Amino acid sequence: MTIRTPQGAWSGLVLWALTALLPAGCDCAGPRGKPWRHEADPAQLAAAEPRSPALTSGDDGQAADILAGRSHTLRVHVDAEPRGLNPLTTPSVWTRRITMGTVYETLIRYEPPEGGAGAGPGHYSPGLARSWRVMPGGREIRFELEPGVKFHDGRAMTSVDVQFTLDAIRSPGKDVDHLRPWLDDIFAVELITPREVRLVLKRPSGWVLRALAEIPILPYHVHGEGLNAGGRIVGTGPWQLASWKNGVVHLTRFGGYWGAAPAIDDLEFAYQPDAARALTDAKRGIFDLVPALVPAHWPEQASAPGIAASFTALELRPPRLRYLAFDCTTPPLDDPRVRQAIGLLVDRKKLARDAYDGLARPAAGPVWPGGPGDGPTPPAPELDPVAAAALLDAAGWRDADGDGVREKDGQRLRLDVLVIERPTAGGHHGGRVRDPERGELLDALRRAGVGLDVRAGSEAVVMNRLRAGEFDLAFVELAQPVDTDLSAFLASDGASNLGKCSSPAVDAALRALSEVWEPAARVPLAGELAAAVADLAPMAALVAPAPQGLVHRRVQGVVVWDGWLDLRKLTLAPD
């Protein structure tokens, strides 16, 4: 399960993990609510306070130094300082953005199509493994490692490092719970030679290759006694860690890199919690990349003087889905007609336009080109309260006594809605975080004759209720890498199938996806999964967030993929 802290980091399973489910934070309910009340987690409040913002605007000397190195440095605005830089043990969004593909590398790479997200399926290419073979029967994969690969401390990378990394993830005692499900289909990791390794699988599974494209290889000689290794950051990538101080992570080009040298010598990731100050710094040439603008001030920010002439829009298109989860095990939501009716009461276009200031798109489910399931998707359902009322009538839920709430067999139609209540970063009493879509959705349900008991609690309490199945509806977010296995989330026996919705057609589509090895072959099968999910209606999909950022025009080679950029492929043109 996944919870977003107020600072924007991720705890538990991370943004790119197999089953990252995020219940959306919001404040207490309307007059029908029976909220739980809990004090905010002090650790979360502490994390929300800016700890070491990058000093840029207020220090002319430092700004001069930054501008002096501009010709060989790409500078990125960071809005949530990472807790650490080890992508296995501190796997926040920014930890992975800063280190994956830059400091740390994977056995194979998952490359975007020409044009980036939504332009077609991705494809595998060699990484630390120069080649691999799926053996007949599909229960064994052999990898030949690239020769001459060295870690940043000069030690050679061998098959021992690969075995160590994969076995550490597979071991419950190593606290890498967010990645372990990816490797469930691996029975053993065996050494053949110093440059060859064999994976023995429990069953044929094409998802193993996809998993390996997300797992960084760590050095055994550094982490053999513990994955944290005293904070040492040693990888094989084209850049190495030069420093991390005053909120700025500085990576510099590694002279002993085994592959093609990157075009940019230095990367700097600077933490600045003040979005307005970050935009001012961008105008001054301090930042080249501002990944996310404040929604309430977009698109005005992008067209402001000093910005439009130097920057272009950047939409990262993360594979994230906001939706309403249903408990499919008990009435009334055990009836798919009731679930479908709720889906028809959602005005997704209005949500995307108004609640998200245009920085989202209507969604039909977890499958779309460039989404968690990468394939064709049915159109998002249109708002249709008349059809919703007809479905509820057909399911036997009618408002016979005219009191505004539907009944069936003497039982009123009432749903428990589960939401998270937490204060904003300003403190215990500094206001409440509210879901953009929450009020409108609950009002639509009430207008349709659905009684609601909105239960608000702390993140820990809500997560416990979700795991125990003590809810009817819950505001949830799915966040995974593009083109990943959705079995844990959608399969009848899936560990993160919160609502226990079950469908033979969905299970068959998931099995078919696991039996193919190439991403392109999964695209039509993902479309079949999308259709089966639409029939089952285990959720009411709401929107796919589409945050808007800025990238300086001197940055060339920008291709958005899986919610981020491949920094290895960027170049800097003269200003």
Image: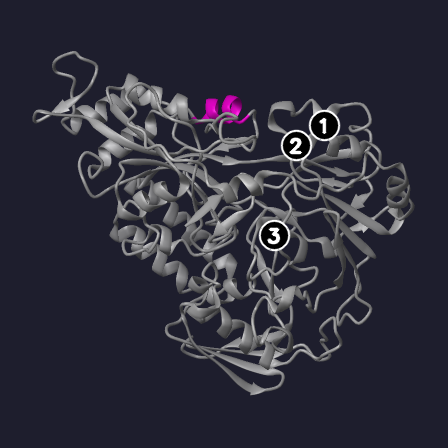
**x then y, percent, for residue 411:** 12, 26
Can residue 103 be seen here? Answer: yes
* For discs 3 and 2, the disc positioned in front in the rendered view: 3
Q: Residue furthest left?
A: 409
Q: Is residue 116 visible?
A: no
Question: Label 1 neighbourhood size at 10 Å, few (<14), some (14-19), many (20+)?
Answer: many
* Display coloring: one colour
Q: CA distance from mark 2 to mark 1?
A: 9 Å
Q: Which mark is residue 293?
A: 2
Distance Cα–Cα, label 3 vs label 2: 22 Å
- Identify which residue is drawn at 51% across, 62% down: 210
Q: CA distance from mark 1 to mark 3?
A: 30 Å
Compare residues 231 and 365 and report the one nearer the observer: 231
Label 3 sits on residue: 83
**Image location of residue 489, percent across then percent down:** 37, 51
Quarter of the image for residue 380 reads top left
30 is higher (above) or lower (below) than 254: above
Q: Amino acid at mark 2?
A: Leu
Asked if the residue under mark 1 is in contact with the one under mark 2, i.e. CB atoms within 8 Å, the reply is yes
Disc 3 crowd, CA 10 A, few/some/many (<14, 14-19, 20+):
some
Q: Is residue 482 magenta?
A: no
Q: Residues within 10 Å of mark 2 (few under 14, many from 20)?
A: many
Which residue in the structure is indicated by mark 1? 302
| The stretch drawn in magenta includes residue 349 | yes
Highlighted range, magenta: 348-356
